[in-house]
Image (spheres, helix red, strand yellow):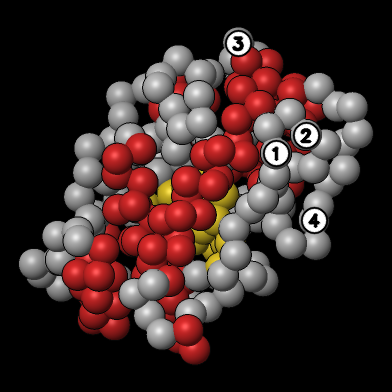
Amino acid sequence: MGRGGGDRSGANRGSTGTEGGSVLPVPPGLVINLPNSDAYTRGVEYLRVMQTLVPEPAMVDVMSNLRDRTTICVWIGTHIWAVNETLQQCLLACHECFHVHQRRYITIYAVPLAQPYQLDGLCNISTNPTTILIDAGRVAPEHWLSIVAHEYAHAHLGSPGHDPRFARVLAHLCLGLGLQPPSAETEAGLRSHPPYIPTSDPLAFWRGETITVGR
């Protein structure tokens, strides 16, 4: 389940890491030690790990972009810790909308998703823990909470559908987070809620050309 270009689908611990350090922010049990590694190597390895968390490895396909892959990998190897920390705060805000015993075990990461899939974010309920992946380049930072809330609703239910159960959970999250609740429970309306305008050049963020978190 995933939301793309204004269409999403897709819940308890996020990534950790230090800028320029030897430990990448990766899922529990997949800590990668890269002593004295350079930013490019850290970025390549981070993307490799992210490929294990998507339904199809081709959904994370930076290396086929011959023009930008070096720039993107260096940027990821240097800055991804800060982006993931911000997404983790969004995840924690969603958790706060539920009692502790209702919270599912969820991880969240930023990753450039392959453009042919047209996905802004996705929730993979097949992983353990459930994984939320957000293409931080396709959504402006001020709207990251909106897309995380949408994917969190899927993760909370363990379901990819946009049915009345999804509508209730999403409405609950929106009220708790100060976002606009869905006004209708139609499939089309729920698929693109909360609303936001996708960025015009998703890779600009990953090339480090836009103002970003931790920069």
Q: Is residue 130 visible?
A: no
Secondary structure, mark 1, is loop
**Taking 105 as reference, is 122 left or right?**
left
Callouts 2 and 1 close, C-beta under 8 Å? yes
Residue 192: x %, y % from top left: 24, 54
Q: Residue at x 40, y 40 (%)?
A: 118
Secondary structure, mark 3, is loop
**Taking 165 as reference, is 78 left or right?**
right
Residue beneath label 1, please?
18
**Taking 129 as reference, is 178 left or right?**
left
> Which quadrant would the N terminus be assigned to in this image?
bottom left
Residue beneath label 3, please?
67
Secondary structure, mark 2, is loop
Callouts 1 and 4 close, C-beta under 8 Å? no
Q: Find the distance from the CA under tag 3 to the CA under tag 1.
A: 27 Å
Q: Is residue 11 visible?
A: yes
Residue 181: x %, y % from top left: 15, 66
Residue beneath label 2, please?
21
Count of residue discs = 4
Q: Find the distance from the CA under tag 4 to the CA under tag 3.
A: 29 Å
Callout 3, which amino acid?
A: Arg
Residue beneath label 4, please?
30
Callout 1, which amino acid?
A: Thr
Residue 39: x %, y % from top left: 74, 23
Examine the rendered structure and indicate whether residue 199 appears above or below residue 163: above
Q: Residues within 10 Å of mark 3 (few under 14, many from 20)?
A: few
Callout 2, which amino acid?
A: Gly
